[in-house]
Amino acid sequence: MPTLYSYIIRSTLGFFLLQGIVCESFAQAEEPPEKPVQFRQKNIAMESYEAVGAWDVDGDDTLDLVSGAFWYQGPDFKHRNHIAQVDRWSNGEYYNDFASIPMDINSDGRLDFITGSWGGRTMLWRENQAEKGNWVAHLIDSTGPVECMQAWDIDGDGQVEVVPNNPGNELKFYQLEGNKFVRYEVGPQQGHGLGFGDVNGDGRGDLISNEQWYEAPEDPFSGEWKMHQELSLGSASVPILVVDVNEDGRNDLIVGQGHHYGLAWYEQSIDESGQRSWITHPIDPYNSQFHTMAWEDITGDGQPELITGKRFRAHNGRDPGSDDPLGLYYFQWNGKSFTKHTISYGPLGEGKGAGLFLTVTDLNYDGRKDIAVGGKDGLSVFYNEGSQP
């Protein structure tokens, strides 16, 4: 959103150049021995909703796609079904639909979904009415502007909670209790970007924003979340990935710049006095608007890869790099750095971006994980064809 540029200017390409670290990732890169995974693109619709989820909407044991005002019946996603009218805002470029999180909220055995948006300033859930359309919208909370949201198991009980990214507002999460959502406060502020994972190695999941992380108490619902003001991640992605990249026993952060150039991982370092610091390692400083990402095994080697790409017209064409070609990529850790593999690349109409909320799952039940991406450049599926000889 235009008002977020205060979060953006700290993470420029010039910063990487001044630090003299741009070339590190590429100089150390060693191509993995296996051949890159090949993908087959299938265009589903030219709608411009930016979020897509995948789950069984109609109970036929087949995954369907849910994006904005429609759900697309699997396995071929040719039959489009109406969900509800989704309003536009901001000169018509944005829809009030910035996430697609499935959850059976009313305990009727059918998966509903949770969404929200910046312009709507609310979180809501849509009640599954697969057989007749016009899914009823139920307000969860007036949260303030929703950049995006994620579902994480905050308390480790096997059930996910929902965490909205509300830049400029307090950090909070919502737990489904019965058929109602209860709001729990974490901290007084959050910026652009949101992550969840164990930062300090105490076995509990912490919450991460772009300039601070909140240390989880033993009881995340009643205890005090301790704020650590030690980050400077710019216009950070949603999600920020919390991953032990270099396998040194400490979790690191993988962060895209949602409204600027840059994709990097931040190595967690602890000195002899116990002081924590974060060392920046560029992954791809030459592309912009890495707003969403996933950490999933798409090569089938048992190790996750980083899947991400460019969000098309994230700020209606006003972000640095907005006119650059679109791209969707996966990055494979080779033990020293990340090796980049291109899934799709090119100008609008040839390349495909990653949207605001992507989904990585096995859509056609062939044992390989596929990628579903929406965006202002349309809705597409990339079927994983495996490594070709």
Image: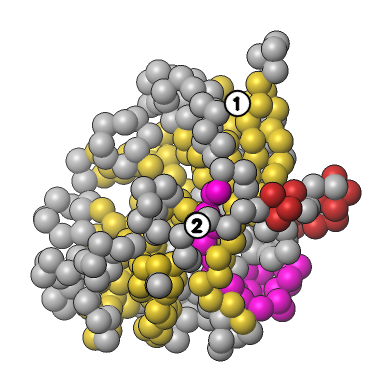
Up-down relation of residue 48 to residue 185 (above or below):
below
**58 and 147: which one is in front?**
58
**5 and 188: which one is in front?**
5
Horizontal side of residue 91 vs 134, given as left or right: right
Gap between marks 1 and 2, in whole Å?
43 Å
Q: Quadrant of the N terminus?
A: bottom right
Q: Amino acid at mark 2?
A: Pro
Reading the image, the residue beneath label 1 is: 227
In the rendered image, is residue 240 in sight? no
Q: Residue furthest top?
A: 273
Q: Amino acid at mark 1?
A: Met
Dots 1, 2 in contact, CB < 8 A? no
**55 and 127: which one is in front?**
55
**4 and 330: which one is in front?**
330
Q: Quadrant of the C terminus?
A: bottom left
Q: Residue at x 40, y 18 (%)?
A: 218
Rendering coords of residue 91 (x, y %): 62, 79
In the rendered structure, which segment of residues is drawn in magenta?
A: 312-334
Q: Which picture quadrant has residue 381?
A: bottom left
Colour theme: secondary structure
Reading the image, the residue beneath label 2 is: 33
Rendering coords of residue 14 (x, y %): 85, 55
Horizontal side of residue 54 vs 331, given as left or right: left
Rendering coords of residue 17 (x, y %): 85, 53
Q: Residue at x 66, y 21 (%)?
A: 270
Horizontal side of residue 160 vs 380, given as left or right: left
Q: Secondary structure at mark 2?
A: loop
In the rendered image, is residue 340 in sight? yes
Q: Residue furthest right?
A: 18
Q: Residue at x 26, y 53 (%)?
A: 103
Mark 1, Cα crowd under 10 Å, few <14 / some 14-19 / many 20+, is some
